[in-house]
Amino acid sequence: MKPAHPSLALLMAIGLVTSQPAAWAHGERHDQVKVLQEQLPTNAPGKKAVMLTVSYAPGEASPAHQHPGAVMAYVLEGAVVSKLNDEQEKTYKAGQYWYEAPGTVHSVSRNASASLPAKLLVWSLVDQGKPVTEPLK
């Protein structure tokens, strides 16, 4: 029930998702973040729901970041080490998940393995026009 997130590919994906300049804080591989869908929920005016995957190569990590909206993450494959706000680092394995409240600082997000890949399914609800992820200020 802790965090894990995307990359520079995310920056690019977020730029596409938000229709504004990318402000992403994850990875440097163009294929690390894949936006699966985005929707404007009719029961949440002014919000955008975004579903994406984040893939971490063995040993790969994301820079510290935060999300302006709520985030739910689910580990599809491998294991991810995550640290939110001032909590301890936690390792989440395939089948485990966590929630991040808006503005949560995600200071650690990395693949727990030096030899196996990891993959997350991420769902976020953000204000329209805001990126899913922002670099930590």
Image (tube, rainbow, N blue to C red):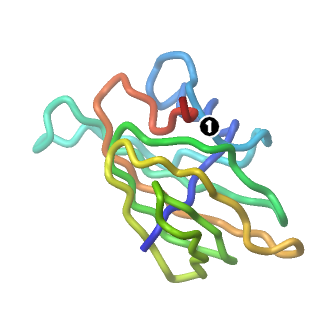
Q: Amino acid at mark 1?
A: Ala
Up the image or down, 108 lies above or below 74; here it is above
121 relative to 39, above or below: below
The mark tally for this picture is 1
Q: Residue at x 37, y 42 (%)?
A: 103
> Considering only vertical position in the picture, is 123 above or below 76?
above
Q: Which residue is mark 1?
A: 25
Label 1 sits on a secondary structure element that is loop
Where does residue 78 sit, x and y in percent of width and height? 69, 77
- Residue 89 sits in quarter: bottom right
Residue 90, image quadrant? bottom right
Question: Farthest front residue?
Answer: 86
Which residue is drawn at the image coordinates 42% and 69% (left, top)?
98
Of 44 and 89, the residue lying toward us? 89
Q: Name the residue rendered at 54%, 45% in the picture.
A: 35
The answer to which quarter of the image holds residue 12 is top right
Residue furthest right in the image: 115
Q: Is residue 28 above or below residue 59?
A: above
From the viewer's side, name the closer residue of 83 and 30: 83
Q: Residue placed at 55% from the left, 16% from the top?
A: 21
Looking at the image, residue 54 sits to the left or right of residue 112; the answer is: left
Residue 27, position as x, y percentages in the image: 73, 43
Q: Nearer the viewer, residue 99 or 122?
A: 99
